[in-house]
Image (spheres, rainbow, N blue to C red):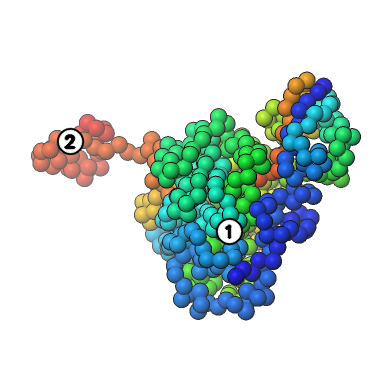
Amino acid sequence: MSYVTSLKCRECGQDYPVKPLHVCETCFGPLEVIYDYERIRAAVSREAIRARSSNLWRYRELLPVEGEPEAGPFSGFTPLLAARRLGEELGVRNLYIKDDTVNHPTLSYKDRVVSVAITKAREFGFTTVSCASTGNLATAVAAHAARARLRCYIFMPEGVESGKIVGSTIYGAQVITIRGNYDDVNRLCSEIADKYGWAFVNINLRPYYTEGAKTFGFEVAEQLGWRLPDNIVLPTAGGTILPKVAKAFKEFKEVGLIEDGRVKVHCAQAAGSAPVIHALHKGTDLITPVKPNTIAKSIAIGNPADGFYVLKAVRESGGWGDVATDEEIIDAIKLLARTEGIFAEPAGGTTLAVAIKLINQGRIKRDESVVVSVTGNGYKTLEAVAGALEQPLVIDARLKDFDALFERLQNGKRPVAGAA
Amino acid sequence: MQVRVRVPTPLRRFTGGQDEVAAQGESVRSVIEDLERRHPGLKERLLDDKGELRRFVNIYLNGDDIRFLDQLNSQVKDGDDISIVPAIAGGN
């Protein structure tokens, strides 16, 4: 049983039935799922949620599905890690990493949104699912579609990391790469969705799909002991996760699961793809698209349709945002790995690098709690950092060679790579 | 100048169900004016009351977002392709 009452246009307020629709016929505004919060308030409790399995469906009353979940039995409920070593380095006491590098089964936050989208695709009776993707979404759709016995077509821009292509094809999906950037792929896919009647998770299932991103925020609140953090830093590409996490915090208050509290929601973008941050810093609502150029390919979206809602959520919360250069992104990935043992993809490096900037700027106070959102796994994007790391040392299999090498290392003299 | 315009599903009720229609004009703006004459109601869907492109509408001229060109003043040539596409934000 669902607590969804309708879809509603976020721009003009027109109501629509619960169908695979995503844009308002009047103004092209995005459609949003509307719930009956009063009924949800009566139905949920902390105890009931705590007693459920550790997956994203523990918040099912606040997700737009009708029946039993058909995907993601182990997706979500990823660790919220108290990052003490990193916190010491940055001079903040209450630093947490929300770690979606270990989301099941495809190691990114996309397992959340896709679990909801695939369940919805089955409910609507689709037999083919598809997506436009820079990579993480592709692997998630391919994996969840395989298990749900749905045919799957994946569209990606040329030049994404090879692991993401392999990581989709392995599940039996048909992968098609497009000569162009992500925005070109998106445009083509919305035309294909129109013509072929497939379930594109991020197009005609978008209102349902995006709701899955709320679970990232629900979990943060529950894992902090049913409290909100003072700050959360989130990456922005198309603009899904940030407004939905802000919505999650509001909904938890609305249905009585947490007391009042205020979270400053901060936005992180890569310097080479930062249309939302440009608008934020200029104080305008107008987002001018850019041609992305960054190693953070998973957040290289130059024309984010939900960017406006990112700006709105950041401003309403009293948050801020900044950009990270490729070099800062790599440094942050290395810092997170070296201090907390978490290997993030460049989007996570971006988020941490921006969190550091906001701390140093005083936008995030050193005595406040802060959650840094790491939404994808570095093992998928080895190319991005491999060139910035030391090469291994090579020696023969002789103890005396190692003795000599070790002595030099102890003296702080690192021999030239490969020629020890 | 004669151009082809691809029409997305939500707007096809204005074009009698056609997914592609012909129109004439010198610029994207004048093409939209011509579309309005041929298919009344379309213009209001594309432009806001100030005459600017609505936030959630993207128009592509031969595959290029007109926001990267000269916006609504982008000049068109005979045989150009124009695509009207609802803005969608994807996932990464």
Where does the image place residue A199, in percent across and percent down from the top left? 59, 48
Where does the image place residue A158, in percent across and percent down from the top left? 51, 32
Would you place residue A9 above or below residue B81 in this image? below
Residue at the location (60% across, 56% down)? A124
Extreme-top residue of the structure: B78
Residue at the location (76% across, 54% down)? A11
Residue at the location (63% across, 45% down)? A197
A272 left or right of B16 in image: left
A209 left or right of A142 in image: right
Q: Which mark is residue A123?
A: 1
**A382 or A183, nearer to the observer:** A183
Q: Say if residue A24 shows up in the picture.
A: yes
B32 left or right of A374 in image: right
Q: Nearer the viewer, mark 2 or mark 1?
A: 1
Q: Chain of mark 1?
A: A
Q: Amino acid at mark 1?
A: Glu
Q: Amino acid at mark 2?
A: Ile
Q: Say if residue A183 shows up in the picture.
A: no
Q: Secondary structure at mark 1?
A: helix
Residue at the location (52% across, 41% down)? A154
Q: Do labels 2 and 1 touch, CB within 8 Å?
A: no
Where does the image place residue A10, in percent across and percent down from the top left? 73, 56
- Where does label 2 land, which residue? A395
Which quadrant of the view contains residue A102?
bottom left
